[in-house]
Image (cartoon, rainbow, N blue to C red):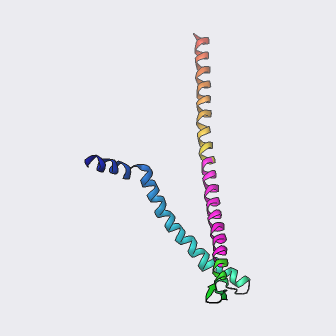
Amino acid sequence: MKNFFEEFKEFAFRGNVLDLAVGVVIGSAFTAIVTSLVENIITPLIGIVIGGVDFSNLSYQFGSATIAYGAFIQAVINFILIALVVFTFIKLINTALNRFKTQEATEEEEIPVTETYLKEIRDLLAEQNNKNS
């Protein structure tokens, strides 16, 4: 039984599991932000542009069954809007990261150039000392 708990402890506190847990929590928070953005800002703006049409109330009564196709249409529209917001957000983050990496790469390239110049100066000084000796 002790071995079981040790294996569980190793599994539960391994880096991958903790990273996954953090990802799920952050993902949930991000989902709430994106959903709020779509439902409270983007969808009303689209409603203003298209004349206040609300698809979610559209339905068809078929006997005792109600087919709420409007809710489905609204869900599809929300999905497209959410996907667009997430895509735009990821694109902005990737652009910022690429600029940051480019800046780091430029800074890293400067160091070897400086080292090359210092080596050339050292070699020239050594050559001068050999001529003077």
Percent x, y for residue 91? 65, 59
Q: Residue extending furthest top?
A: 133
Query: Any magenta on residue 90?
Result: yes
Percent x, y for residue 42? 65, 77
Q: Residue extending furthest right?
A: 50
Residue 77 as seen in the image, left or right of residue 31: right
Percent x, y for residue 108? 59, 40
Residue 84 occupies quadrant: bottom right
Which quadrant: the C terminus? top right
Image point (67%, 75%), residue name: 77
Image point (57%, 70%), residue name: 34
Image point (51%, 64%), residue name: 27
Q: Tell me: residue 8, above or below residue 64.
A: above
Q: Is residue 44 visible?
A: no
Query: Any magenta on residue 81?
Result: yes
* Image label count: 0
Magenta: main secondary structure: helix
Q: Nearer the viewer, residue 97 or 83?
A: 83
The magenta-colored residue range is 74-101
Percent x, y for residue 94? 62, 55
Q: Residue extending furthest left?
A: 2
Q: Tell me: residue 22, above or below residue 64.
A: above
Q: Nearer the viewer, residue 97 or 119?
A: 97
Q: Is residue 104 visible?
A: yes
Residue 60 occupies quadrant: bottom right
Image point (52%, 72%), residue name: 32
